[in-house]
Amino acid sequence: MTTKTDPPAGATAPPAEPNSRREFLMKAGIGAGVVALVGQAGASLRSLVPNVSYDAPTTVKLGAPTDFPDGMKFLPDERLFVFREGKTFHAISAVCTHLGCTVRAEALSKVEEASVEGKPLRLTHRFQCPCHGSKYSGDGTNETGPAPKPLAWYQLSVAADDGQLVVDLAQEVGHDFRLTVA
C-alpha cells in the first residue's frame, strides 16, 4: 500500500497544466478579435449615416415686412416671389413644376383683378419658364407648356422674436392664403 506523503519543506508545488493556460490565452485572443471586428463593423455602418443634414432649412426668415415694397420682390436664394399689397402678403414658388428651372416674372402692362379661390387678387406679373416655355398666370396657375401643375404657394408667418416674415418651404398652402401683418 502506498501512502501519499506531503512534499518536503521548501519544495515548490507542481506546475499548472500547460493546456489550461494555453486554452485561456487562445479564448482571450479570439474574444478580443471578435470584439474588434464587431466594433469595426459598427463603426463602418455608422459612417453610412450622416451627422449633418446638408439640405437647406425649410423655415427661412425673409426680413422685416417693411423691407418688402408694394408689388413683388424676388428672393433668389429661396427661389421665391413675395407679393405685398399694403399689409397683406403671399409667397409663390419660383420653381417650375416641369423640371425645376427658375421661372422669370414678367410685369403685366396693366394690373389685372382676379378672384383666386374666392378671394380678390391683384395680378401684376405673369411667370414664364426659360427652359421649356411653360407659362403661368400671376397667381401661379399653369396656362401653357409642359408644366403639369401650378406653382406652389407657401405658408408665411411673422417671427415672434423679431417680427420678420418667415416662410415655411415645406408647407404648401392654397391660393387663397394671405398673411395680413398688423
Image (spheres, rainbow, N blue to C red):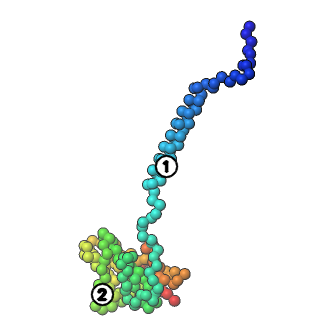
- In terms of depth relative to the viewer, which is nearer, 87 or 3? 3
Residue at screen point 72% across, 19% down = 7
Separation of marks 2 and 1 at Cα, in angstroms: 58 Å
Q: Is residue 110 left or right of residue 11?
A: left
Per the rendering, the mark at residue 107 is 2
Residue 54: where, in percent of width, then height? 42, 66
Residue at screen point 49% across, 87% down = 181
Residue bearing the label numbered 1: 42
Neighbourhood count class around disc 1 (C-alpha, 10 Å): few under 14, some 14–19, many 20 upward: few
Vertical placement of 104 versus 109: above or below? above
Residue 106 is drawn in which quadrant? bottom left
Residue 91: where, in percent of width, then height? 41, 80
**Position of the N terminus by quadrant:** top right
Q: Nearer the viewer, mark 2 or mark 1?
A: 1
Q: Say what amino acid the circle numbered 2 marks.
A: Ala
Q: Say what amino acid the circle numbered 1 marks.
A: Gly
Residue 28: where, in percent of width, then height? 56, 36
Q: Is residue 46 left or right of residue 16?
A: left
Per the rendering, the mark at residue 153 is none
